[in-house]
Image (cartoon, rainbow, N blue to C red):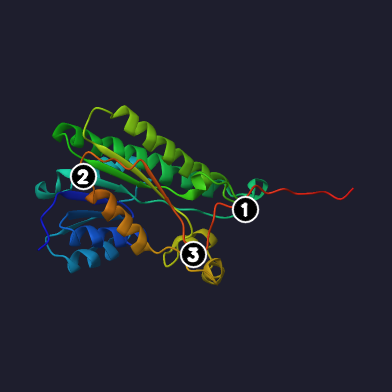
Amino acid sequence: MTMKKGIAFVTGASAGFGYAISKILVKEGYKVIVTARRKDRLESLAKEYPDRIFALEMDITKIELIFQKLHQIPSDFQNIEVLVNNAGLALGVGAIPDINLEDWDRMIQTNIIGLIHLTQYIINGMLERNKGHIISLGSIAGTYPYRGGNVYGATKAFVKQFMLNLKTDLVGTPLRITNIEPGLCGGTEFSEVRLKDIEKAKEVYRGTKPLTAEDIAETVRWVLSLPSHVNINRIELMPVCQAPGGVTVVKTKN
């Protein structure tokens, strides 16, 4: 029998990582607040688990509306013990001379600005109750640069450092802080959104066996299952078909 646990809050829950994480947390005994822009998908998820999921339509880039949305949470879902900052995206793979500034702005607004504002709001309640775990979905792109990764990689590097500093600021409290940094992951909308082309997105994974959303959800489950005195600062995970690689050297012809 699954033991009842606390309240979890998952952003970007309408598909991919967020969807898989929300489902595994419900099965683990959590009540889950699921947020995303696509309300129909959230409501479909909520129907699968009556009384265990509260669907909250929210665009994390609309900072001025986040707090209004959070005040719509019913009383029996308000004591949030787990925050999963999953909402994020990559747009484009162009090198810096050939980029779209609107794509850069949207990545920064979603991956950084929305994340830190939401975290600041929810962490206050965790500190009052002296209990909580904040998990963010970073990326190996925040550690290893690659051509076309530019601002996306920079946003994930920010998240990594923000989470490490957050843990440092909270030392002496029981709050736990974890950054999960996946490598190549398939079966989600990530590459379709980034490339805006389904066939090109399929080519990214052709001939590979990438990580899946379920692998990431299982990682979240494991991190949460550890004894309360154990904090996992960072987890970097890749499929076996991927490696950090070496430093690129370009040789010119004399």
At label 2, the amino acid type is Pro
**Is 227 located above or below residue 37 in the figure?**
above
Numbered badge on residue 94: 1
Give the mark nearest the N terminus, 2 or 1. 1
At label 1, the amino acid type is Gly
Residue at 18% across, 44% down = 80
**Is 126 located above or below residue 17 in the figure?**
above
Q: Is residue 9 left or right of residue 245?
A: left
- Residue 247, given in percent of the width and then of the height, sits at 65, 47
Give the mark nearest the N terminus, 3 or 1. 1
Disc 2 vs disc 1: which is toward the camera? 2
- Helix, strand or loop at disc 3? helix
Residue at 14% across, 35% down = 129
The answer to whether the residue labelled 3 contacts the one labelled 1, judged by CB atoms less than 8 Å apart, is no
- Residue 38, given in percent of the width and then of the height, sits at 32, 60
Q: CA distance from mark 3 to mark 1?
A: 15 Å
**Is 145 located above or below residue 202 in the figure?**
above
Q: CA distance from mark 2 to mark 3?
A: 38 Å
Dot 3: few (<14), some (14–19), or many (≥20) neighbours within 10 Å?
A: some
Q: Which of the two residues, 56 or 254, is positioned nearer the viewer here?
A: 254
Q: Is residue 51 visible?
A: yes
- Helix, strand or loop at disc 1? loop
From the image, tell me which residue sits under label 3.
192
Disc 2 vs disc 3: which is toward the camera? 2
- Residue 53, given in percent of the width and then of the height, sits at 18, 59
Residue at 13% across, 52% down = 5
- Helix, strand or loop at disc 2? loop
The answer to whether the residue labelled 2 contacts the one labelled 1, judged by CB atoms less than 8 Å apart, is no
Dot 1: few (<14), some (14–19), or many (≥20) neighbours within 10 Å?
A: few
Give the mark nearest the N terminus, 2 or 3. 3
- Residue 207, given in percent of the width and then of the height, sits at 55, 72
